[in-house]
Image (spheres, rainbow, N blue to C red):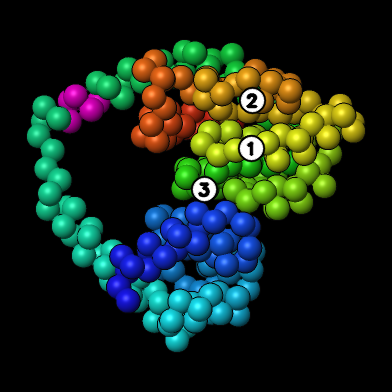
Amino acid sequence: MDKKIIHEKLEEIVIRNDESVRTIIAKTILELTKIKTNIIINDIANASFTSISSVTKFCKSLGFTGWKEFYILFRSEGDNEQSNFNQEMTLTDEKINNLLAKHKLLVSEVLSSNQTAIVELRDLFTSVAKVYIIGEQNYYALLLNFYHQLIISSYDSYLTCLNFIAKKFFERLQPNDLIILFVLDHNSTYLINLIKQKIEEFSFKNIKIITKANTVDKVKDIITTTPILINDKQKIYTHQTIYESLLIILNSMINIIEE
């Protein structure tokens, strides 16, 4: 079985979205291998909040003797695909200038439309005890970098893209904590209802929501501070548009907490 087939199998498991240990490990492998090389079994076990034996069992269920055989084959095809990609990608000066111009315009639009919300977040960071980041797997690499920056800046921070772990966060939530919630591609009704319970329980107010402008009504019941909005003038909201806007927003958030 080569990596392409392994990758497709992992995607099939993830699509089920049943929050089983099997699904969680598959999600973790797909996301962690995007941002890190030379991964060991401990990395997967720690990131997925499971165990080495669970990861080993998962690999064996796919027909491998264990993690080493699985990872060697998973990575080998990826190296070949990257080599082919590098050969095909040639950027001319014109292409580079066009990309820079588009990015500069996007930065200006995103930051100008969210200036109040981002400044408001800066003020929240001056008084919060713990920061709980709750995001989506599609943007895990960006969120992980943001989380690491908070840790470096000495904030007591936690990150998850899984509902059952988010629920654990809410169980220990205190009035002076901060929730940063990303509502972008997935159905977040479950999380929204959990947050509503906390608002009703002790008038929890430190919630910063990052969402698309066309879906802000879905989170209106838990808006306690000005939301940060990703706005696509064409109303298409492709993954690339959201990703690029989110990168700008997170970089801006990192800058304000380091000031």
**Which segment did they paint magenta?**
96-100
**Labelled pair 2, 1 in contact (Cβ < 8 Å):** yes
Q: Which residue is mark 1?
A: 188
Q: Which residue is mark 2?
A: 218
At mark 3, the secondary structure is helix
Q: Amino acid at mark 3?
A: Gln
Q: Amino acid at mark 1?
A: Ser
- On screen, residue 24 above or below 179: below
> Does residue 256 appear anywhere in the picture?
no
**Labelled pair 1, 3 in contact (Cβ < 8 Å):** no
Q: Residue at x 49, y 28 (%)?
A: 249
Q: Residue at x 75, y 48 (%)?
A: 167
Q: Residue at x 60, y 75 (%)?
A: 54
x, y percentage for residue 38? 39, 69
| Cα–Cα span, label 2 and label 1 | 9 Å
| Left or right, residue 193 beside residue 229 | right
Q: Amino acid at mark 2?
A: Lys
Q: Which residue is mark 3?
A: 137
> Does residue 188 appear anywhere in the picture?
yes
Q: Quadrant of the C terminus?
A: top right
Q: Residues within 10 Å of mark 3 (few under 14, many from 20)?
A: some
- On screen, residue 151 above or below 54: above
x, y percentage for residue 124? 70, 26
| Cα–Cα span, label 2 and label 3 | 20 Å
| Left or right, residue 174 beside residue 164 | right
| Cα–Cα span, label 1 and label 3 | 13 Å
User: Nearest the camera: 136 or 109?
Assistant: 136
